[in-house]
Image (tube, rainbow, N blue to C red):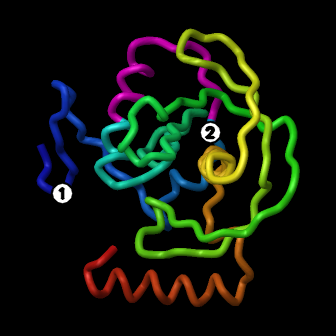
Amino acid sequence: MNNNQDHKIKDGISNKLRIYKYGEDILRKNSKNIEEIDQSIKNLIEEMKIKMVEKNGVGLAAPQIGKSIQLAIIDPSAGETPEECFTLINPEIISKDGIATDEEGCLSVPGVLLQIKRSKNITVKAIDLDGKSYTKTYSDFIARIIQHEMDHLKGELIIDRISSLKRQFVKKEIKRLKENGEW
């Protein structure tokens, strides 16, 4: 065990996942579809849920924990209401409607909050844990979380959704956070 790794035991699950941060190559890769939902995928999902709650997140995509696969966990309650948590496997947005701008943070860009424009309503096609395809429409906060996590599956980050001038400011802020040991 490495002291630099996060480690937590919950319900017998050892969580050694780490969150990759802005600047690490894995976050820029396009994720591959999951061909089979086996026990290793189900175990990974449980580990991701633990890590997301531990970090007070509302969403976590597989690339953020070093896996270039089409998998995201969404929990708008940030762990307060576990039954609200759901998994997206091989998700695809099939329709969008409306525009809304709101503040977003990202576990891979800690300490940074940005105003991001997203679709207000989306319809997503994905696969459930039983391997069955489903289509569902989401709105507002949940739609925002899904779009954010799906960006990760395409190798995109919130910093890519702002102007180049704002991006330079954010990069300076990240440098400051690193220098202060807050990153």
Answer with the quarter of the image where residue 72 lies.
Answer: top right
Using a 10 Å C-alpha cutoff, classify the residue at mark 1 as few (fewer than 14 neighbours), some (14 to 19) or many (20 or more): few
Q: Earlier in the sequence, mark 2 or mark 1?
A: 1
Residue at image position (35%, 28%) is 46
Answer with the quarter of the image where residue 100 lies.
Answer: bottom right
Magenta-tinted stretch? 32-47
Q: Position of residue 156 (x, y in %)?
A: 65, 57
SS assignment at label 2: loop
| Along the viewing direction, whichever of 75 and 64 lies nearer the viewer | 75
Q: From mark 2 to mark 1, how far is it between C-alphas?
A: 26 Å
| Along the viewing direction, whichever of 77 and 55 lies nearer the viewer | 77
Q: Position of residue 28 (x, y in %)?
A: 60, 55
Q: Position of residue 119 (x, y in %)?
A: 79, 55
What amino acid type should be assigned to the residue bearing mark 2?
Ser
What amino acid type should be assigned to the residue bearing mark 1?
Asn
Tell whether position 154 is magenta. no
162 left or right of 174 in image:
right
SS assignment at label 1: loop
Q: Is residue 165 above or below residue 82?
A: below
Using a 10 Å C-alpha cutoff, classify the residue at mark 2 as few (fewer than 14 neighbours), some (14 to 19) or many (20 or more): many
User: Looking at the rendering, in which quadrant would you find the N terminus?
Assistant: top left
User: Residue at label 2?
Assistant: 31
User: Residue at label 1?
Assistant: 4
Q: Are marks 2 and 1 in contact (CB under 8 Å)?
A: no
Q: Is residue 77 above or below residue 37?
A: below
Q: Is residue 54 above or below residue 166?
A: above
Tell whether position 45 is magenta. yes
Answer with the quarter of the image where residue 159 lies.
Answer: bottom right
Residue at image position (52%, 31%) is 86
User: Looking at the rendering, in which quadrant would you find the C terminus?
Assistant: bottom left
Residue at image position (52%, 14%) is 37
